[in-house]
Image: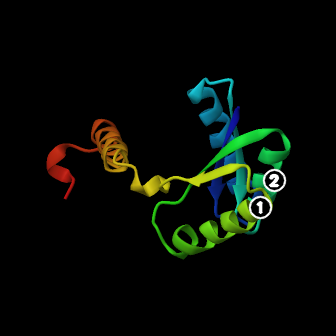
Amino acid sequence: MSNSLLLVAHGSRRESSNDEVRHVAMQLQQQLNKPDIEVYCAFLELASPSIAEGLKHCIETGTQQVTVLPYFLSAGRHVSTDIPAIIKEVQALYPDVDIQIIPHLGAATAIPEVLAQLTIKRINASLSSTQKPENIC
């Protein structure tokens, strides 16, 4: 049984932003290091492939199980309504394929830790390059 992970992002008019998502999908493929899981990406709007196209591509390559990962920081309308609606439409066309949506990126418990690390790294870089601690505020 073949598996796919579909990384779903909003999409942008800036192609370089869409390329960043594609690059994350490639990095995720390498991080997973599982030959039986193929990682693809798709976009809600403004870029290709669409979510429906991405799901169909996964299925047409022989996938029997697709896991959809919304690459969104918050559970707004796109995460709570739009993406599930698209998945439901495609699922109706392919009832024998298991399509599951997992919690959006922002729901990951590691997000605050990553943000703290980025902040501390930046503050430490600023302190060591130009300022003494008493001059920060």
| Front-most of residues 75 and 81 | 81
Question: Residue 35: x and y, percent?
Answer: 68, 23
Quadrant including the C terminus? bottom left
Question: Residue 49: x and y, percent?
Answer: 80, 57
Looking at the image, residue 74 lies above or below residue 68: below
Looking at the image, residue 64 lies above or below residue 54: above
Residue 33's tag is none
Q: Are marks 1 and 2 in contact (CB under 8 Å)?
A: yes
Reading the image, the residue beneath label 2 is 56
Q: Residue at x 67, y 43 (%)?
A: 65
Looking at the image, residue 85 lies above or below residue 18: below
> Which residue sits furthest right?
60
Callout 2 environment at 10 Å: few (<14), some (14 to 19), or many (20+)? some
Q: Is residue 72 left or right of residue 18?
A: left
Q: Residue at x 57, y 28 (%)?
A: 31
Reading the image, the residue beneath label 1 is 52
Dot 2 amino acid type: Lys
Q: Residue at x 27, y 41 (%)?
A: 127
